[in-house]
Amino acid sequence: MHKFIVLAAALALTLVTTGAFGADPLKVGFIYVGPIGDHGWSYQHDQGRLAVDKALGKQVKTLYIEKVTEGPDTERAITRLARQGASLIFTTSFGFMDPTIKVAKRFPKVMFEHATGYKRAKNVATYSSRFYEGRYVIGQIAAKLSKSGVAGYIASFPIPEVVRGINAFMLGAQSINPDFKVKTVWVSSWFDPGKEADAAKVLIGQGADIITQHTDSTAPMQIAGEKGAKAFGQASDMIKFGPKTQLTAIIDDWRPYYVQRTKAVLDGSWKSTDTWGGMDTGMVGMAPYTNMPADVAAMAQATEDKIRSGKMHAFDGPIYKQDGSLAVPKGKRLDDGTLLGMNWYVKGIDDKLPK
Amino acid sequence: MNALEAVLLTIITASTPLLLAAVGELVTERSGVLNLGVEGMMIMGAVTGFAAAYTTGSAVAGVAAAVATGVAMALLFAFLTQTLAANQMATGLALTLFGIGLSGLIGQPFTGLPGVKLGAVHIPWLSDLPLIGPVLFGRDLLVYGSVALTAFVAWVFARTRPGLVIRAVGSNHHSAHALGYDVAAVRYGCIAFGGACAGLAGGYLSLVYTPQWIENMSAGRGWIALALVVFATWTPSRVAVGAYLFGAVWIMGLYAQGVGVNIPSQFLASLPYLVTIAALLAISGNRILTKVNTPACIGQTFVPDR
């Protein structure tokens, strides 16, 4: 329903603007997988959209469609924005990859930006953020604070982005406690508060006293709070959902990138690029370190600083795969290509990767 | 709290909203009306339940608001389909879309606020028993309500005159009308009951399950409830079996993953659907009984001759 209202409003505006003004503003479209009120993934992307509005004012007109399911609906939604005259469209979920490429072929003059994917075209750029850097930091915190030595990991789908996160978390934890355990539960959804809550309850029941998630709702944070466990926020600062529960949160900050790319379209310098920004570019940020002793917070801050300055990398060797084979020797770093296609677990993870 | 207890408790909370919504829809469908708006009524119940509980500080007020909202949504559906004789399928789908959109709008100021949780009851001695105490005697009132409601509906259909009238209206509205029953009035009542249950199921989500308001938080549970009713061949006891089986298989799937059982998670995620359908088809194998239970007039519009 929401999207219809937005579309109707957008359509009305299109008619008004084309009739009344000479120079049309650049239309920039956004497709979100969740509701913008999820206070997680989609919320952060929408913050980016608002930043574009704020930075470029009358030069742009932003449109968005939220709650777009990954599948046939995606193509329709993207096509709609393109038909409405959007010159730049951000599709902000991994599952939007193929539909984006498909629609891009039909609208060669429209520029597309796909988040977290790997397929590009002349008019399709990709961008993502090195969330795994943050996951290494929270892995260290978890290993320091956990009394049971077990963390619960609520995962969505077994795509490289998620697998990379689990590995980075584990490597961070192992750097503190080599015997640390991670229990992983796949809920097969990006956003289902009930399911995520169930998973959190089950994990805590099985002895995990720290919960982390790669899903988008705030429910696990709340359940952790109820059961006396600690948790990490996902995508945005979730401190108000767990003032006594959140240790920190990995924050995705898309604002600078969205503004910069929109400006590039305005001045004609836009090109199909592949951006993968981390803490050094400000795309990944950490919420304040709370609910932990000062020495743990200081350790986390130090790791964060080292990763930001490039002194350290979450995937510095030696790294062993789950089966014990060497993936990266000492003194080397895992290359971006392997990271982007990561489909194996590091040593020490009990879970079997769903195929 | 040991692991078994945690699992059982989680199964109960996961199953209760499904059972509540499904029992309500069962009554609606038994009267010959197919209301596809369960999801919409549920999500509206969730948002108003949360809003009322947050504003007044009382979870009971939240429950009341959730029920009232469900009824209001259902009466809108009843007015369109019974009084104006609109197509039930289209109206139901519209009700769902309307509910999801409107709940997002109403819920905007309530996103991210700490909720009020409907507390669990505590019965002296019984609640303190190991394992069965907290699982059976230490739940919130809605859990007991959902079971009592199912038993009540089963009793009404099996033993009472109103139950017979509802079934008559659902089986053949022309005959029921000829016998002097007010088809529209009976259906209004059944639709409203269905709405109350769906609203209550929504309230359960935002007051017990995850006590906060999150847009779209029902996440398709209304549709699962709808499917349960059909696969349970409109029989209350089977709806209860189906709802609990679904919840149990779902939670066991999560549990198995946490333990590290070597089964693909995608398979575990689809298992609740497969097991529930298979089980309900197996127990609903009697074709004659199925035919007797199926409301013959389901989904058909009835306009009495004047």
Image (cartoon, helix red, strand yellow):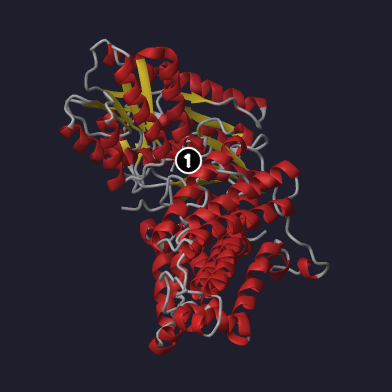
Q: Is residue B126 visible?
A: yes
Question: What residue is pinned by disc 1?
Answer: A216
| Figure quadrant of residue A214 | top left
Identify the residue at image location x=46%, y=19%.
A306
How many labels, in total? 1
Q: Residue furthest top?
A: A267
Dot 1: element: loop
- Residue A141 as seen in the image, left or right of residue B142: left
Front residue (pair B286, B81): B81
Q: Nearer the viewer, residue A7 or B234?
A: A7
Location of residue B98 in the rendering, given as x and y in whole percent from the top left corner: 47, 48
Q: Tag 1: Cα neighbours inside 10 Å, few (<14), some, or many (≥20)?
A: many
Q: Is residue B290 left or right of residue A91?
A: right
Quadrant in which residue A106 is drawn: top left
Pointer 1 chain: A
As drawn, which residue projects farthest toward the right? B124
Q: Position of residue B125 (x, y in %)?
A: 82, 69
Q: Is residue B126 above or below residue A21?
A: below
- Is residue A253 something one can see in this rendering? no
Q: Identify the residue at horizontal 39%, vertical 39% (top origin).
A: A4
Q: Vertically, is A90 above or below A187?
A: above
Residue B152, percent from left and from top: 65, 77
Q: Is residue A28 left or right of residue B193?
A: left
Quadrant where the N terminus of chain A sits is top left
Query: Callout 1, which amino acid?
Result: Asp
Percent x, y of residue B276:
44, 71
